[in-house]
Image: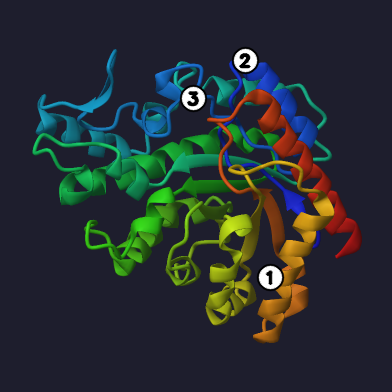
């Protein structure tokens, strides 16, 4: 853990149309924990849901976009579970047509001196966000369908395992993020998901990943009940929008204290993606320090907070223009360096 303090990484998406250029930016600005870039402006197949849909039961990518089709769902589910049980990772691969950035990143790492890389970060859309974005034949999202929801949890877990297997040749510690903006809706009367569902699903989803020795992170760019994540046994990293929601996050001091004591890491999404303008690294670092001070007053160990402190943008950058995305990554790099030097 000695090299964690101030380490910067990204969320996933970038607005570039050229994979190699996206990889250039990542290696320039987050060299310690680089990530493969999701590039939704290139193709609809690189969208947050579609990107992880290949070979999942009932899902078809058509000209109009991703849809759930009637087909022979029982037969698809039978084949799907055969592949899960046999751990056929190749069946769950993310092909170059769906993730140009992933494959460009892999090729680039294959030709680099990796001595300066502490972690390689990968990502998958989390199951609640994924299933909330797919409408079944009954007109409801498949969050409401227990059979399909369970299949998607299994399938997304296999997508994560495939990535870990692909990148293991580089011999680096791996971070696997599940991107879950939907968690900000948990507890609403309009969703079938409650706190216990989140804990149960992520406990199941992450069991097989922990066997591979990776760190597991969950990113939510809205406010939520953060105790759901501190209380899920296999979650190692909580990534939140610290620019907008730090004051609410620190209300969970007792939960965060327990989380840190069991080895947890807090990734402060401190560089704003909405409203980014002329913030400087000192100002952003000071904002984090104010959050740390509040937690310390609530008897959270300052040394643990600093040892387990990562930074990131508040959210993905895929919808922005390229110059703004690069500005955010540059500011992230500067903030990381300031924290490492001064905290």
Residue denoted by label 3: 40
Look at the image and tell me whether residue 281 can be seen: yes
Across and down, in percent, residue 122 comes to 57, 39
Local packing at callout 2 (Cα closer than 10 Å; few below 14, some 14-19, many 20+) is: some
Residue denoted by label 1: 291
Q: Quadrant of the C terminus?
A: bottom right
Labelled disc at residue 54: none
Q: Nearer the viewer, mark 2 or mark 1?
A: 1
Q: Is residue 150 above or below residue 328?
A: below
SS at mark 2?
loop
As drawn, the residue found furthest toward the right would be 341
- Please say if the residues under marks 3 and 2 sit with CB atoms less than 8 Å apart: no
Across and down, in percent, residue 80 comes to 25, 34
Earlier along the polypeptide chain: callout 3 or callout 1?
3
What colouring does the structure picture have? rainbow
Across and down, in percent, residue 75 comes to 12, 30
> Residue 308 versus residue 154: which sits nearer the camera?
308
> Residue 241 versus residue 59: which sits nearer the camera?
241
* Occupied quadrant, residue 35: top right
Labelled disc at residue 18: 2
The residue drawn where x is 17% and y is 30% is: 76
Q: Is residue 189 above or below residue 216?
A: below
Earlier along the polypeptide chain: callout 3 or callout 2?
2
Q: Quadrant of the N terminus?
A: bottom right
In this image, 200 relative to 164: left or right?
left
């Amino acid at each position: 853990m000695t090299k964690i303090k101030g380490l910067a990484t990204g969320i996933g998406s970038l607005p570039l149309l050229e994979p190699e250029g996206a990889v250039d930016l990542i290696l320039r600005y987050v060299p310690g924990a680089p990530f493969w870039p999701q590039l939704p402006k290139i193709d609809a197949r690189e969208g947050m849901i579609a990107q992880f849909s290949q070979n999942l039961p009932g899902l078809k990518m058509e000209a109009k976009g991703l849809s759930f089709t009637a087909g022979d769902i029982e037969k698809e589910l039978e084949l799907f579970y055969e592949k899960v049980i046999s751990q056929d990772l190749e069946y769950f691969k993310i092909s170059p047509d769906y993730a140009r950035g992933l494959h460009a990143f892999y090729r680039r790492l294959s030709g680099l001196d990796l001595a300066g890389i502490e972690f390689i970060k990968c990502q998958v859309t989390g199951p609640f966000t994924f299933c909330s974005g797919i409408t079944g034949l009954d007109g409801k999202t498949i969050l409401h369908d227990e059979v399909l929801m369970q299949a998607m949890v299994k399938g997304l877990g296999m997508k994560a395992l495939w990535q870990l297997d692909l990148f293991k040749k580089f011999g680096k510690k791996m971070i696997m993020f599940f991107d879950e903006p939907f968690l900000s809706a948990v507890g609403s009367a309009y969703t079938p998901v409650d706190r216990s569902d989140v804990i149960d699903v992520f406990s199941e989803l992450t069991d097989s990943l922990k066997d591979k020795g990776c760190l597991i992170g969950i990113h939510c760019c809205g406010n939520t009940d953060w105790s759901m994540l501190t209380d899920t046994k296999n979650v190692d990293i909580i990534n939140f929008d610290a620019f907008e929601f730090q004051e609410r996050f620190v209300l969970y001091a007792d939960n965060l204290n327990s989380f840190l004591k069991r080895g947890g890491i807090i990734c402060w999404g401190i560089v704003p993606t909405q409203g980014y303008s002329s913030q400087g690294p000192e100002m952003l670092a000071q904002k984090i320090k104010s959050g740390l001070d509040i937690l310390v007053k609530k008897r959270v160990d300052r040394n643990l907070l600093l040892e387990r402190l990562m930074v990131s943008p508040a959210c993905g950058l895929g919808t922005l223009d390229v110059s703004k995305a690069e500005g955010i990554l540059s500011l992230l790099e500067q903030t990381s360096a300031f924290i490492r030097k001064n905290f």
